[in-house]
Image (cartoon, rainbow, N blue to C red):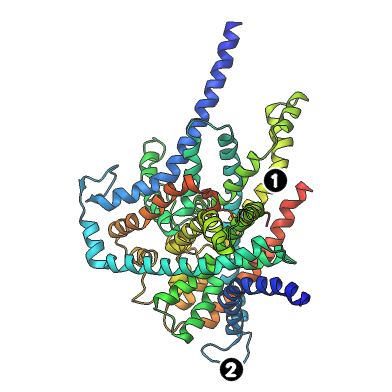
Amino acid sequence: MKRGAKARPVLVTLLMLLPGWAIFFGLFFYPMMVTVVRSLRPEGEQVGWTLEHYVRFLSEPRARDVILLTFVLSVASTLCSIAFSLVLCLVLRRKPRGHRFFRLTMLVPRVVPGLIGALGLLLLLGSRGWVNLFLLQFPFIREPVQINYTIPGLILFYTWLYFPFTAVTTLSTLESLDPAIEEAADVAGANRWQVLRHVIVPLIMPGILAGSILTFMAAFGAFSIPLIAGGNYRPLAVEIYRQIDFTPARWSAASARAMIMALLQVIFLTIYMRVLRRPAA
Amino acid sequence: MTLLRQYLRAIVNARKLLTYTFLLCFALAIYLPFLMIVLRSVGKGWFGKLWLPPQLTLDWYRWAVEVTNIVDITKNTLIIAGLAVIMATLIGIPTGWAFGRRRIPGKELLMSTILLPRMIPPIAYALGVAQIFYRLHLINTHFGVALSHVAVCAPYAILVLSATFEGLDERVLEAAAVCGANPLRTFFHVIVPLILPGILSSMIFTFTTSYNEFTLTLLTYGKDTVTLPVRTYLAIGEGYWEVTSAMSVILVIPSLIVLFLIQKQVAPEKLVGGFKGV
């Protein structure tokens, strides 16, 4: 009797956890397994095992370019996000007038669909967009500057869309910082720059790290932006989609690329965390 | 001495000016793209080096409604988002309760596995989801598309709801019991009012997630379940920038309204963050 009474809450807890687990397995784990198996099957068949798709993709010279491009885009946009978020958050922390509005503004790129942000940026930065009209006012700029469909342009797009991850965590870490620490540094005779360099930045590093990982992951997996704004530059996600976009769809080829992508993400993340953790340690 | 003070004041003022210039540029960088979309959607004959469209028109909106059948598409989007919200909430309440109220060995690990779908790029498992759905004939059904959205929506719901349940104070429940409320009464008069804000914010988050979801929809949609983001993408491919802009305006307005409405009630930062530490 007593044992039964004790076992029941455990059973209830397990039952309550069940829906979450069912979704996890049904919609994530099982599809991933399907993708793995598909990538090892010959194209369009249900039997047999082959590594052909991996070998074929990796032996293409383009594969290296695609992987390099994905890596460059995500790392560069992460670095840009960190730099921009740091300045923005240091400014917002002083609570200038209207800071609530700017805080909300910071979230806008995450709330609207990525497609629309990309569309707006394409219009704004195009050869007839306002940015180019403004730049043409200067006497030394004769031709419209090509921003869209270039790698720096893509980095700008990614940063615009994914910096909120970094900014939000940086800001919340910065605000939970004890002002007494800064005052202590101030009293000890450190100037503003020294306080920032040796006190504030090391202290908020964990927050920046956590946020920038989110930015990195989002940029690495970015799909909708390079799909419409990438032009000839195709990162991995777009490369995967291109395999099944036309008929006959090459599901196995796409799956092999997806597995390479997932693997690379894990590797990059490990390296990234190592590199960023070192100065903090 | 006064000169020195003037210099100092000038520096302080310049700092302020610099701050506001920076913030202004930031706000412009965020909002100008939307302004461009709005201008493009109402402009006519806007070619060459013109800052503003020479004529205004609503033709593109009429086009958007007539040619792309935007009423049906909006209906699809709302049905799918509604289904996804219902499913995610039904999953999130029990699982969130277990995470928030129960002592579970290895809770952190369990939580991070459940959050895994938000970390792996959706395209990787969307491929698998699409293949499974083709086999189960779930492609091109509202339920199927909504179900695929649950993969990204449910982790949000679980996260928000487990925080809600965790914040539920045991003493309040005890107080209710001491005051002679039976469990049923406690549930309806004490627990439900306390967790309702959490459930509402989880529903709002999952709704916006599903409403904006693109990757999973693109791989599971059919001709009867085109949603607004997919339709916008197709329109971009067709190259009608004006009509696309008009559709984007229609698509983006609800998101912005939601953002400005919920900022007072719930911390909108939750929309972005979610993981602690990683």
Q: Which residue is mark 2?
A: A47
- Residue extending farthest top: B1
Discs 2 and 1 carry the same chain letter: yes
Task: Confirm whether residue A60 shows in the render.
Answer: no
Q: Residues within 10 Å of mark 1 (few under 14, many from 20)?
A: some
Residue A168 percent across, percent down from the top left: 57, 47
Residue B133 percent across, percent down from the top left: 48, 81
* Numbered tag placed on residue B190 in the rendering: none
x 72%, y 66%: residue: B104
Q: Which residue is mark 1?
A: A205
Pick the residue in front: B215 or A178.
A178
Pick the residue in front: A174 or B25.
A174
Q: Chain of mark 2?
A: A
Query: Considering only order in the chain, which callout, 1 or 2, is on the residue closer to the N terminus?
Result: 2
Residue type highlighted by circle 1? Met
Residue A193 percent across, percent down from the top left: 68, 30
Screen quadrant of the N terminus of chain A: bottom right
Give the left or right position of residue B243, taking residue A30 as reference. Answer: left
Residue type highlighted by circle 2? Val
